[in-house]
Amino acid sequence: MLGVALLGPAVAARAGGRPVSLPSADGTTLAAQIYEASSRPAPGVVLVHMLSRSKADWDDIAEQLEGTGITALAIDLRGHGGSGGSAATLTDMTQDVRAAVRWLSMRPSVRPDAIGVAGASLGANLALLAAVDQPLVRVVAAVSPSLDYRGVRVGPDLMKRLGDKPVWLGASTEDPLAARTIRELIADGAGVREQHLSPTGAHGTNLLAADKALAGALVDWLRQRLLS
């Protein structure tokens, strides 16, 4: 019993990362949570949530990444969670993801040559868009993307612009729009593309929470791509 009592507070103190803040390109203050790997400098991954949600949706994945030796930064997009600004214009949020990538890459404890971005739903589209013009981004993962999420558009042309950057794409077979989007995104055959379709009926980070095998596949892919 004594051993359990001693271990409990230590584990609790470690869980959940620690809060930080960073500026977006237009000065909007973004709230974030960083989960720092113990071995440094470490690869880094920016995690982008769904519309009307928050960085907390990524807690489980972020802690798994931290445990594998990858530092994770989960952000609140503008107008969400603890961040300032307005969520009225979704396209403005792309600059939030870019700012998070830059901020993470400048940390002495993070390898600037091993940065990834992962997003879910709206966050998936934002992650793909941010990766296109960010040379710092080495890999990108998109869970339940949409060809056009309220004006935030992705498509085969964007995939061509990503070139050789490896891309991980995941969705539920019960989510026809996301599954069709993935088929269209990989249609050109360019670059290294990995497709994962789950039979679990859920969307975005809800899908990762419901399908632990899919979540594990995402974490393992990021580990293989960024720790090599």
Image: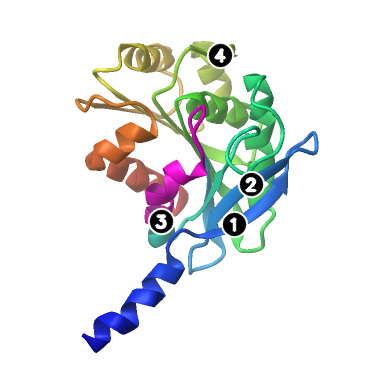
Mark 3: few, some, or many residues within 10 Å (few <14, many ≥20)? many
For image coordinates 64% across by 28% down, the residue present is 94
- Give the spatial CA distance, label 2 vs label 1: 7 Å
Tag 3 secondary structure: helix
Rendering quarter of residue 78: top right
- Give the spatial CA distance, label 2 vs label 3: 18 Å
> For the magenta stretch, what is the residue range?
49-65
Against 110, residue 173 (above or below) is above
- Residue carrying label 4: 153
Tag 4 secondary structure: strand
Q: Earlier in the sequence, mark 2 or mark 1?
A: 1
Across and down, in percent, residue 79 comes to: 64, 32
Across and down, in percent, residue 140 comes to: 49, 35
- Residue carrying label 3: 63
- Give the spatial CA distance, label 4 vs label 3: 30 Å
Mark 4: few, some, or many residues within 10 Å (few <14, many ≥20)? some
Residue 19, which numbered label?
1
